Structures are given as structure tokens and as C-alpha cells.
Amino acid sequence: MATIHMDNLCKVYTGGVKAVSNVNLDIADGEMIVLVGPSGCGKSTLLRMVAGLETITDGTLKIGERVVNKLEPAERDIAMVFQNYALYPHMTVFNNLAYGLKNRGFKKAEIDRRVREAATMLEIAQFLDRKPRQLSGGQRQRVAMGRALVREPAAFLFDEPLSNLDAKLRVQMRVEIRQLQRRLRTTSLYVTHDQLEAMTMADRLVVLNGGVIEQVGTPMDLYSRPETTFVAGFIGSPAMNMLPADFMREKVEADGLAHVPSKADLIGIRPEDFSTDQPGEGDLQLSGQLLLLEPAGAESHLHMRFEGFDRNVVVRLGQVPDVAEGQEMTFSIKRSALHPFDLESGQRVA
Amino acid sequence: MQTKRMTFTGSWLPYALLAPQVIITLIFFIWPSFQALRQSVYRQGDAFGIRPDTFVWFDNFRAIFADPLYLNSLKVTAVFAVGTTLLSMSVALLLAVMVNRMIHSRDSYTTFLVWPYAIAPAIAGVLWWFIFNPSIGIMPYMLDMVGYDWNHRRDSNDAMIMVIIASAWRQISYNFLFFLAGLQSIPHSLIEAAAIDGAGRMKRFWTIVFPLLSPITFFLMVINIVYAMFDTFGVIHATTEGGPAQATNILVYKVYRDGFVNLNFGSSAAQSVVLMAIVIVLTVIQFRYIERRVNY
Amino acid sequence: MVENNRWGNFFAHVVLILGVAIIVFPVYVAIIASTHPPGTFVRGVMPLWPGTHAWENYTTAITEGRSRAGTPPIGGMMWNSFVMAMAITIGKLSISILSAFAIVYFRFPFRIFFFWIIFLTLMLPVEVRIVPTFQVVADFGMLNSFAGLSIPLIASATATFLFRQFFMTVPEELMEAARVDGAGPMKFFKDILLPLSITNIAALFVIMFIYGWNQYLWPLLITTDPDYYTIVMGIQRMVTGGDSEPLWHLVMATVVLAALPPVLVILFMQRLFVKGLTETEK
């Protein structure tokens, strides 16, 4: 169990490509931190820097009280779950789990105890004598988890561990990993590109873009108050609509946008914040033409076109409305649902 | 050149790992080759050191290219290499095409056809030498019935034919395996498409299959020429010993005779350097080809 | 096949059976000849049906050889060939896998330079440097020794390249996982890389063993002591050793014995052999 402390971490590859710039992050003991961002954003690099698989160009990395910048991966007291599992194909499941303990000189009895305990916890005890190729994808994933578990490390590092599973298994394993982490209270760093996975698993989320941290916070913090247009667009699905402030000012009554700072030139509205209910006191109203209706059973996505704005606006409703494509529709929006941004800097204003 | 994304650290370890290979290469490959290069521009002094080695520029090269025996050897080598390559490749292709038609018997035929690869060229030479033996061999006996008087001890053409057959025989296995692998990698849908387009069996072979095999054919051509030029020393040495009348005196055999038996070091070194140039050219061609194959 | 007519198949079988017959014929003749008494070969045409002297000929060849003409018994030569082939095979495999490991898994100054040095061996077969290589071996006092027969031949660019190619296909994460699990370079090599390379090693073993067993020019150059003759070069001594016609019954018994080990290796390990052959040349 340990805290992880990143102070100004930088990674510059030979040739000058900056993969990670000035990352500052404090991870509390037992916390589950999810690093999320599009591919190439530096999230895997940052994880691998913590693991010791990438050298740290600049800055300080502490695990617990130790500065580990120069330590070998094995000396950092971390365990890692790889995207392709990286199971040793020629070893049995038992030996896959035991290899790291053997290398550390554990006694046979202790190795045996830990492997069996982890295997029972992960429900792979009956596969201990098998080779990885005789297992299904989900079972291999569990073995990879087991290899991390037996080590009882200070921190778990997960590098997109679920991306090789099919959708159904992914949801199931997501829950299991989260439950396991809650039970063991081991500090964890989890990398994913899937924002839903990130939202559901994290104590705190770190959104990375271009090697820079965009925002850190609880999932609901990031959802309800994205600090940049990037976070606004990345968290939530379908993505937040970005409408020009000028267009909005034209469309709604004069005082509708009174609380929005005048220097905001982009207004973000989440698809789920549009409502077909009667407008309440002070709510905004927008009318447009329905281009396409995507019914999805419990909910529906409506692609709308508002006059004066040349892009589709997506609206998400909690039911499938009885409307025809081409029809005019009017929506009401709460004032508090508006996210004002500065186009130039991409930062939230006020 | 590539390494792994992440590499091990260790200042002396990689050098220690490479050391055995590199040391052996330097001592037994690079150094002697360098010596051959050196000797090729010197005239050998006498054994007592009274007359030291003298630097003679390209005299040795001038001498070998003026020597009718060497020019003859070049010609003999060319005939021999082309003959061996053509014979073994055409027989191998025919057999591979036939085996590729088979479904049940494919593996058994393959087994029967691959093992000659295990037989050393020298032994292959002795085997055919026995079969062609003018007094008791079965081939001269049969040729005699059709009125041909075979004698590779006197007749240059007979000797050349014999060493070509002996060298090609062993190489058929090799070419066969590569042709078969090539044929099996041709998508069956292509053949079917050609059949639907109305191409008959022969037409399909020459317009679809053979062009698709051309990379392998080219590759095998280079390999076979290298084989015929360098690996067939045993065939010649164990049977004809270059004769009769220089008719089978291929370059490799001549370089051995001149250097090792006749102790004519300058000339032998110059011949070695010419051979070196030939190998380098062939190796470069071969690797250029591999690059292409990897890229498409 | 698109259209499989019966005549076409019949024709193919005929061609193949003829082909196999031609391929097998020389060895058949050798086996037959090795079963006949010496008198058979004095005149007439060589026999095509088995004789009765097989046991006698083979025991003579193995235990006596043709001592008067300076060729030792076959038994000893076969042993020499075996030792040489094994030394070359094991030597090539071990130094090549180590070099490939260094080249793929380490980054260090002069890496490319070393790679090219190894590559050069491809362009310098013994045949192009006969005399100077002989001189080097003589200077080391390695003439007439197993060390001389094997060590100069164990550098191998092909094996190094094959291992390098294979290592490049081993997932990166395996090495990273091993490092997180506390394995250093040599431990990773021994515990992970070596077990994963087993099939490749076996395939190369087959090819290298045949290569080693069939060496001809090299033993010819550096052995003058019959105690170190190998069987493949020894046959040449038997054929040309005397002024008279060769003793065909003994020569052919020797030929059969010389060909047997590598042929058996191919027949019993055909799958590995094909894999080794097609991959070393890529």
C-alpha cells in the first residue's frame, strides 16, 4: 500500500518528440486512478514511466516515500496487467503466477499459498495446470490479474486490460476488477481509452491530451463541470454539442444568456440536457427540424438542425418520441446546463 | 535497424554475448579474406626468405585473365552452373506441379523426393560416377544398346553431363520443396477465376501459376547458381578431378588445385578474390530480392 | 483442383513414379552393389539384384576399411563425422542465439557494425579463402584436431538472422512482464526466450547437422592424419586411393553408411527439416 507522487514528470523521446509534459499528480493510498484519453495522448507512456518500462526524462516519481526514478521495474514494488496479458506461453498458469515470486526468492510454501489464494479469488483454481493457450480470453485475463495479485504489491498498474475482450465480458470484468480493488484497497493506476470504462471504474479520472493533463477529478466532477472543451467532448456519450455563442444569443430571448460571461464564444450543451417538457422559469427554448431519429429502445438520439447553425445537434431523450423526420421540434434547456467556453484557449469561462 | 521498444541495460553484457561469434568471424573469416586480398597483389618469395614477397600491383589478375586455362575454367563453370540450375529446377518444378495435384498421396511423394538433400555432393558424385562407369556401369551399358559409346574418362562432354547430373540430382529435393511451398501459397480462387474465364489447364499454368511463382523461381535461380559454383567442389574432387583435359575444372576446384596442391599462392589468391567478387554480387542480388519480397 | 479428370491424374502418377524412381535409383544401385562379392565388378554390367555378401562387406568396411591404401576403418571415420557434425551444430546454434539476443534485446554502441561483421560471413565461404584460412588454422596448431574441424565453421549469419527474426516476433510485453517479475537479461533469456525458441532450435539443428556431416573441403584441407578423416571425405580416398579400379563393394557399403545418418535425420524429422530449410533461406 502506498501513495504515488508525480512531480513535473516529462518524457521526451530521442528526436525531440514530447510524449508527456509536466505531469503533476498525487495519488492517495488505496485510490483507483484512471488515465483516459485518445490514442497517442501519452497515457500509456505515463503508466509505463511509473512501471519503470520507460525512462523518466525529467521530474520526480515517488512510490511511497521512495524516489523510484532510476529503479528497475522489479524494484518498484508494482505489478502490471498488460493489454495482451503477456502470459508466458510455455509455462502453466501456476508457474505464470509463481514466476515473479520465485525470482524474488520466496519460499515454496509461501508461493503455493499465495498462488492458490489468488487463483481461488479469481476463480481460476481449476486451470492451474493448464497452459495459457488452453484458456479462453476471459480466463487469460484473469491469469494476468492473478499474476499481479500474488505479488501483493504497493500498486497495481493496468494497461488497457479489457480491450482484448468482447463487449459482454468487458462489462463483467470491469465490475470484478472494481470490486477486487475496493476489497484489497491497493493503490491502482488504470489506463483506458474507453470513457465509459473510465467513468465507471475511477475514484478519480485524469484526462490526458497531447501529453498534458487536461483535468483531474471525480467522474461526476468532470461530467458536470468540464474545464476544457476537450474534456467536455471526451467525457459523455454522445458527445457534448458545441454551439457558437453568437448563434445562441440570436436564438434565445435577451436575458436567456445574461449569466453567461460575454467573452464566452462557445456554449456547450449535453444531448441529455435537451428536454421536451414545458419550459420552466428562466429556461431557454430552441426550435429546429428533426433530420434523423435513432431509436434505441429505452432512449433515442435525435439529430436536429437549427436554422442559422450548419451542423447537426444531437439530442438524447429518455424515450422514443412519436415524431416524424422533417418535423419541427422545440426543446427547453435549463440555464445551469450551459457550459461556456473560450474558443481560442478551449478553457471554461467562469 | 530495429530493436525492441524497450531494451535491457548492461554495458558489457551485449559485447560478451556477441564475442564468440565476432571473434570466430574475425579470425577465420575476415582475417583470411584480408590475407587473400593481400596475397593477390604480391608475388610469393621463396621459402627461405632469400627473395622476399614483392608487391606486383595487379599482375596476378592480369596473369590469370591471360591464362587460357583460367578462361577455360570460367567457361566450364558457366556451362556447369547453368546446366545444373536448369536441370534441377525444371525437374523439380515438374515434380512439384504433379505432387501439388495430389490430395492423399502428397505427403508420401514428398517424403520420397526430399531425402537426397541429405546426401553430400561428394557422395552424390561417387554414386553417379559408379552408374556411369564405362566398364561396368548400367548407363553406358544401356547407351551402348542405342549405339552411343559413353566414356567420361576420355570424352569432355560425357564428363560434363555426368557432373551436371550428379550435382543437379541432389538439388532437386531442395528446389522441389520451395516450388511446392510456392504452389501451395497460390490462392485457389485465382485458379478458379481463370477456369471461369475459360483458361484450360496448360493455359492456367503458364498465365497464372508460373508468373506467380516467378519470385520463388528467381530466388531459386540465385541459390542454385551459388550451389553449383561453390558447393559442388566435392562432386568434382571425388570423381573427375577436373578432367578429362580440363573439361570439368570449375573455378572452385581450380583455386584449390593451384593454391593447395600446386602452391601457386599469388595466382590462387587472385582467383579467390575473383570468386569473392562473384559471391558478393550473388549475395547482394539475393538480399535485394528478399527486401522486395518482404515489402510487397 | 478445378477439374480433376482421371487421365490427368493417371498421367501425374506416372510422372511422379518415374521421378521417384530416378531419384531413388542411384541409392538403390549402391545398396545392391554393397551386397555383392568383389568379383562381381570385374567385368560385365553392375548387378541390379541383391547379392549375398552384405554382412561380410559391411563388417569389413566398418572394422578394416582399406588399410593398404591408407583409408582407416569406417567405424572410426563415422565417429569423427558425428563428433564434427555435433560440434558444428551445437557451436553454431549457441553462438548464433547469443548474438541474436544481444542484437535484438540490447542497444549499445557499434551494434550495427557487429551486425555487418556477422553478415559478411555470408559472402566469404571457405572456397574463396582456402589457403589463408588453412594458414591461420595451422598457426593455431589446430590441424588434425576436432577443434580445427569444427570451430572455424561455427560462425553463422543464417542462424543469427533466423533467431533475430524470431525474436522480433516475440511480443514486447513478454520481456516487460519478465522485468516486472524481477528477471534480469540472462534470466529472461534462460526462462522465457530459450523455451520459446525450442522449435526453431530443433529445425535449425536438423539443417546444421546435415551441413556439418556433409562437410568435405574443410576436412580435406586440415586433416592429414587418417585418425581424423571424416567419412564423407574418406570415400574420396577409397575411390582414388589406389591405382586399380576402386573396390566397389566396399566403396558402396561406405557410401550407404555415410549417407545413412543424415537421411535418417531428414526422414524422421521431415516437418522440422522443411521448416528449417524454408525459413533459413528467407
Image: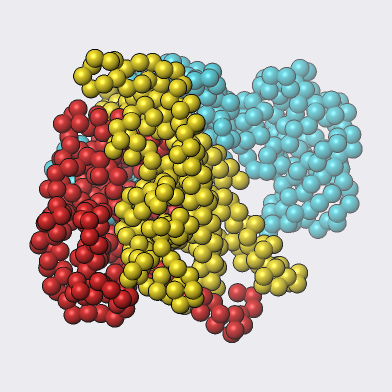
> Is B206 positioned to the left or the right of C95 in the image?
right
Nearer-the-camera pick, C167 or A199 = C167
The quadrant in which residue B132 appears is: bottom left
Residue B277 vs B56, above or below: the answer is below
Asked where in the image residue A53 lies, by quadrant, the reply is top left
Residue B229 in the image, given as x and y percentages of width and height:
44, 45
Residue C91: tell me if it is visible. no
Q: Colour of chain A?
A: cyan
Tell me if A304 is positioned left or right of C274 in this view.
right
Question: Can residue C217 be seen at all in this image of the molecule?
Answer: yes
Q: How many marks?
A: 0
The answer to which quarter of the image holds residue B185 is bottom right
| In the image, farthest residue toward the bottom | C6
Q: Position of residue B263 (x, y in %)?
A: 29, 32
Give left or right: position of B256 versus A336.
Answer: left
- Horizontal and vertical percent position of residue B254: 38, 40
Task: Out of A217 and B68, give the one closest to the viewer.
Answer: B68
Residue extending furthest left?
C63
In the image, what residue occupies the spot 39% across and 50% down?
B243
Question: For the point 56% across and 54% down, which residue is it?
Answer: B217
In this picture the colour scheme is: by chain
In this orientation, which residue lies closer to the viewer: B165 or B109? B165
Q: Quadrant of the N terminus of chain C?
A: bottom right
Which residue occupies 40% across, 33% down? B272
**Does A52 sit left or right of A162 as displayed?**
left
Q: Position of residue A159 (x, y in %)?
A: 44, 39
Image colour assigned to chain B: yellow
Q: Which residue appears at 62% of the width and 31% of the height?
A: A231
Chain identifier of the red chain: C
Q: Nearer the viewer, residue B45 or A266?
A: B45
